[in-house]
Amino acid sequence: MSDESNLSGVEKIKRESHHLRGTIAEELKNAEPAFGKETEQLVKHHGFYQQHDRDRRGETGPDGKRLGKAYSMMVRTKLPGGRLSARQMLDEIELCERYGNGDLRLTDRQGIQIHGILKGNVKATIRAICEAQMTTLGACGDVCRNVLSCPAPYRNNRVRDEMHAMARRISDHLLPRSKAYSEIWLTDPETGEKELAGGTDSEVIEPLYGDTYLPRKFKVAMALPEDNCVDVYTNDLGFVAIVENDRIAGYNVLVGGGMGVTPSNKNTFPAVAQPLAFVTPENVLRAVEAVVKTQRDFGDRSDRKRARMKYLIHDWGLDKFRAKVEEYYGEPLAAPRPVAEAGVEDHIGWHEQGDGRWFYGLHIDNGRVIDRDGCQLKTAIRRVCEQLEPNLSITAHQSLLFADVAPEQRGQLEAILRENGVKLDGEISEVRRWSIACVALPTCPLAVTESERVMPDVMAQLEADLRRLGLENEKFTVRMTGCPNGCARPYNADIGLVGKTKNKYTIYLGGTLRGDRLAFIYRDVVPLEELAAALVPVLAYFKRDRSEGETLGDFCHRKGAEDLLGFAENCSEGELSGLAGLSERP
Ligand code: SRM
Ligand code: SF4
């Protein structure tokens, strides 16, 4: 248990907030463009972040004086398993145009973000999201975040639906119970009347979380052994379904994943989750509670850099952690079942659902839903939703699935995409399909450099190099972030590009598509313009020395950093050119 005298500032803010109320309601009434420092921490639990436009830093007014920060809010919708209806997607699009900066951002946790909302419009935005039967409650803050589950709408057996239903149950179970959310966002300030349902009350206000909620964010995901498309190993708590006779017999429980690193603190590190136990479906919520209580009571509340559950497990060891979880669970936990974890799908392109209908996975570059010259992606999605009314789901790769499309509607869907300049799956390179980048500049306050905005150029260079090497059909992940916090999960990718300082990146290699192994540092402080070139020797070496069927990540893992660097330093230009046709490199 944490020492009361040593609590971090955020712990005190939460404790004194009267269950997430603080002075949010009062501050909403004033004309200031921003919330105060303490409220900035609290509003995260309600599903939004206070940000400012970093492109506009240092702007001056007509008098030549520096203007203040251009504040706005980013509101995040939480969608368990990433599912939403066409109507809900249309509502999100309308909201980003009415109150936001005009585009949507699909996240790698199957959520939706609207950026650029002025403080005066945040209440209307949250109300509208709730009116559309979605929520922002707990999308951020020290609680359980969006619960991930495979978004593919296969209907030939009930496995994915059962898993999705369980993700919803976990998500509902771990919602904050305080009425603060409905009071502040869903109640008429004049009459005090509650206008929309939301938030429940009970005698004990937060029976699970307590007055100070969790020490830090808490992430849960559910995956299938043959399809870890949600990257289950990067979560605090993961569930891998054990399927018998087309039904889920239970889940292997994984604990302690997490990506964030603080380079100045050598005691911080990324971790992939480890197997803890096996539970049957009826015991999942009990197990979730037991793990959450263990982290609630023993997670570090003095140092937010070491407050995630991965550090508790590291400091205690898995056996001590399991023993404590079992105390809360009330009996010994069964050992995890042996399971061959094989694959990962991105669900892009056409797939028969198993009920005569189809789903189409639309790759979206870094999740940004925007109309640009030559590619009217937002318009295309709007038209598909209006005309075909498909069910939708967001993938953990920041992309979108249109579900339940009748066979005779397939042509119409493709035509809408084509008319709006949106590329179909066959026109997108393998490397682009499997790449993601975090938001970074200009909205993320923690970014030290660019990510989403430069990723398309890095992709274009890599696409050209891979073509020259004859490796364009290789399947591997490239994930880029604008700082070491790891939002695009770069530390378990085949190639991770992590922002180190302005315009410079650390290159990680040797993770895997399956996501169950950490990558190592290959090169540090590499300028943006040299990233693709720095990877060419690795790709060329892979082409020459890979064993049959070996993936890029497995090859790099086998060789290790020293060997890869040795090859890069010693191979002659001639050898590289021979392997890669690099004389043609522009
Ligand atoms: Fe993240 C903080 C964006 C997934 C680890 N993340 C942030 C903030 C909110 C910056 C801030 O604290 O002010 C970023 C907002 C940028 C913006 O302008 O939109 C941000 N994170 C994102 C998103 C949008 C990235 C994306 O491009 O998709 C993802 C939103 C997911 C969602 O819908 O909930 C997002 N963040 C992740 C993931 C990936 C995942 O969860 O699967 C991670 C790594 C896994 C993990 O949590 O360990 C991640 N974000 C972080 C961290 C480091 C946490 C840590 O333990 O050290 C921070 C910083 C923090 O919490 O202090 C952070
Ligand atoms: Fe921001 Fe860093 Fe997360 Fe990218 S990885 S969104 S730069 S916090």
Image: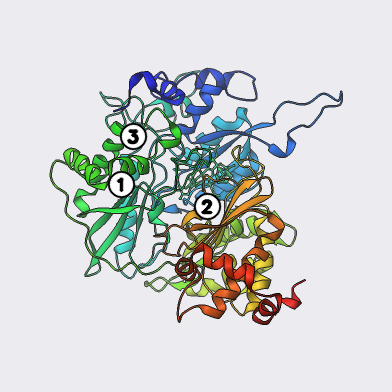
Q: Give whichever of 519, 362 is nearer the camera.
A: 519
Residue 204 location (% of width, % of height): 26, 24
Residue 304 location (% of width, % of height): 44, 32
Q: Is ligand 1 within 8 Å of the beta carbon of the residue shown at mark 2? A: yes
Structural crowding at the residue carrying mark 2, measured as other residues with C-alpha within 10 Å and reported as few (<14), some (14–19) or many (≥20): many
Q: Secondary structure at mark 2?
A: loop
Quadrant location of residue 321?
top left
Separation of marks 2 and 1 at Cα, in angstroms: 26 Å
Residue identified by numbered label 3: 299
Residue identified by numbered label 1: 169
**Which quadrant would the N terminus be assigned to in this image?**
top left
Question: Quick one: label 3 or label 2, which is nearer the N terminus?
Answer: 3
| Image height of 432 relative to 40, above or below | below
Separation of marks 3 and 1 at Cα, in angstroms: 24 Å
Q: Which mark is residue 488?
A: 2
Q: Secondary structure at mark 1?
A: helix
Q: Secondary structure at mark 3?
A: loop
Report the residue at 52% width, 79% height from top. Answer: 545
